[in-house]
Amino acid sequence: MVLQRKPKTSLLELLESHVGGSIPERIKDLNVKLTEANRDKKSAEAALAGAERQAEDQRQQLHKVEDQLTIAKEQMGALKKQLKKAKEAATHAEYEGYDTSVKENKENLRAQVTGVCRGYCLQVWIKALN
């Protein structure tokens, strides 16, 4: 007959002594921690989704602003061209105005000189005939 030695402690008691408490309590604690971790994970996933939506919205807004900036630059270029043309037209008008004034003054002076010459001629002839 072979004698088998009976262990002094059961496997459950051995595990409980190694874990440091009763196994059902330890399982319950771990389940609570797992539930908290899952809740934290869902919260982090929701926050990540919100941040991704916000980043996408900001990307779209940036794209719109870049488009508006491009349009504004094009408009500014067109306005600069118009300003240059307007300045050239103003300069041209100024020169035309100067030329017109010169012509008017020339005609006025010609008329005045003609009048003065006639008057002088008359005076000379009057003196000569007297």
Image (tube, grey):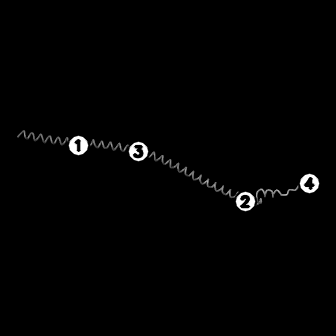
32 vs 91: above or below: below
| Left or right of 39 in this view: 80 | left
User: Which residue position is annotated with label 3?
Assistant: 80
Q: Mark 3 or mark 4, which has the lower sequence index?
A: 4
Earlier-in-chain disc, 1 versus 4? 4
Nearer-the-camera pick, 61 or 25: 25
Residue depicted at 28% across the width and 42% down the height: 98
Mark 1 secondary-structure assignment: helix
- For discs 1 and 2, the disc positioned in front in the rendered view: 2
The residue that mark 1 highlights is: 105
Residue 113: x, y in percent? 17, 41
Percent position of residue 11, x then y = 82, 56
Residues tagged 4 and 2 counted as in contact (Cβ below 8 A): no
Mark 3–mark 2 Cα distance, whole angstroms, equals 75 Å
User: In the rendered structure, which disc, 1 or 2, sits on the residue that comes first in sequence?
Assistant: 2
> Which residue was labeled with disc 2?
29
Mark 1: give few (<14), some (14-19) or many (20+) Cα within 10 Å: few
Disc 1 to disc 2, how far (Cα)?
110 Å
> Which residue was labeled with disc 4?
3
